[in-house]
Image: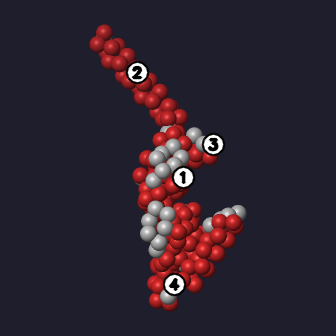
Amino acid sequence: MNSTRWTLAIAAAIALALFTVLLAIPFMTTTLSDGVQAYSQGDYATAYKDLKPMAADGEPTAQYILGEMYRLGQGVKKDEAAAVKWYKKAAEGGSPEGQYALGMCYATGVGTEVDMIGAYQWLSLSIIRLASWQNERRSLAVDTRSKLLTAMDQSDVEKAKALVLSWDKKLGGG
């Protein structure tokens, strides 16, 4: 009888501990919005801590923000090549902001060599995907792409357009 009571008491204690842990899990989980909020409030250390694992797991918004942090040196040592790496992951994951940032890096040579075909490709994709409230960014992408067209030869333009169509399909477009 004594043994049964101890077994029940231990089982009850384990069940209570498990229940407590399960209740706490939602409060211990960091969300993308937590990281975005920390970033927007200038708490770069928290933003990096929150967003880095998500970015490593393939979250495009987290990847884009890490790119921004590296490009601007916000909470991390400024590293434009690392910024391009994160922008590329975000762009390939479907982030219009990542596509815009990568296209601008390729157009200007920030963190990478100038790549007019890549710039045209990613700026075009961002133009298609940027939200309606991002008109200023879209206009800058359109202007930059227009300048690229004047510097590119026709065969490079055709390559770039083919890449746009291919990536648009991969990303769920027409």
Label number found at residue 41: 3
Q: Which residue is mark 2?
A: 12
Residue identified by numbered label 1: 72
Q: How many marks?
A: 4
Can see residue 100? yes
Vertical comparison of 156 with 13: above or below = below
- Tell me if mark 2 has few (under 14), some (14-19) or many (20+) residues whose alpha carbon lies within 10 angstroms of its own: few
* Quadrant, the C terminus: bottom right
Residue pointed to by mark 4: 152
For the N terminus, the image quarter is top left
Q: Quadrant of residue 97?
A: bottom right
Q: What amino acid is found at the position of numbered circle 4 in the picture?
A: Met
Q: Position of residue 170 (x, y in %)?
A: 47, 73
Does residue 31 show up?
Answer: no
Q: Residues within 10 Å of mark 1 (few under 14, many from 20)?
A: some
In screen coordinates, is 12 left or right of 3?
A: right
